[in-house]
Amino acid sequence: MIIRSRKLPLTKYLKDERGLTLVEVLTTSLIFFAILIPLIGVYVKGVEIYQTTSLKNTLRNDTDFVIGDVMRTIQEADYVKLPSASADPEQGSADDTAARHIVSASFPEFADATSSSRVYLHKRSVKIDRASTSTQTVSLLTRETYAFAACETHGSEINPCSHIPFPVDRDQYMVKGFFTMPQQENDDAAQKQVVLYLVVALRYGSFPLPSTEEDRQNHQLFANWTEVENAVTQNTEKAQYVRVVRTEIELGSEQKG
């Protein structure tokens, strides 16, 4: 009895070595890219949204940290007062004017308020007077000036500062702060608070800070305060990387200026 093998149709196709035609390759490629390109667009958009959200969250958190440090510093003082306009070296400069316009755009009442970029903090200390015949203690009141401006540096040398800078990451941020004290015109009025208007702008759209000068130029958001002012007043896309905050700092009964 002779048994003949029967070839299955699948064997026929497996042994077919003709390959695909050019039309079939092009059609397959077209379908593949028609699916892939929208997916790439969705992925890129998702990455951009994630980066933007991360930058805004970091800006918000770091701004809150600066505000907390300023509040703590002021509330630890025994006496608080603002300098006169003539004692504020920054007032009238281009950067100061631009920053004030930014604050006024968000808080219109600031334009009519008496404000300063500096604040005087007085602290009491006790000293033993050994020169007198009987030991006596003398109460001293020392004044320290605080501001957001950085001390100028020239190489490894730092010019003597007329103020103590509030701690801020100035490599990553541009920061301007202004202080007001309600009713300061009346010396007899009990001033219970200092109002801080703070402007914080991201220098670069990248975290961590770009390491090379080329990367910094590629990721730079703002080069000066005029650019920040234009972004805020014109409400451009970069305005989302600027935060303007008003904070009331309560003073103790003995801290009035």
Image (cartoon, rainbow, N blue to C red):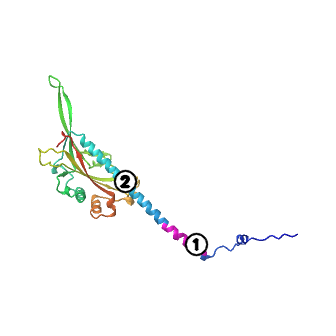
Which labelled disc corresponds to residue 230? none
In the image, farthest residue toward the top: 133
Nearer-the-camera pick, 60 or 253: 253
The boundaries of the magenta stretch are 24-38
Q: Give me the C-alpha separation between circle 1 and circle 2.
A: 44 Å
Q: Where is residue 127 drawn, in percent x and y?
A: 20, 30
Report crowding for label 1: few under 14, some 14 to 19, many 20 or more residues within 10 A (C-alpha). Answer: few
Q: Which residue is mark 2?
A: 57
Q: Is residue 131 left or right of residue 73?
A: left
Nearer-the-camera pick, 120 or 164: 120
Q: Secondary structure at mark 2?
A: helix
Asked whether the residues under the numbered discs 1 and 2 touch, taking CB atoms below 8 Å apart as contact, a structural biologist would say: no
Residue 125 in view: yes
Quarter of the rendering containing residue 45: bottom left
Q: Where is residue 212 drawn, in percent x and y?
A: 41, 55
Q: Which residue is mark 1?
A: 28
Q: Where is residue 3 drawn, in percent x and y?
A: 84, 69
- Answer whether residue 37 is magenta in the image: yes
The kind of residue tagged 2 is Asn
Is residue 209 placed above or below 2 in the rendered structure? above
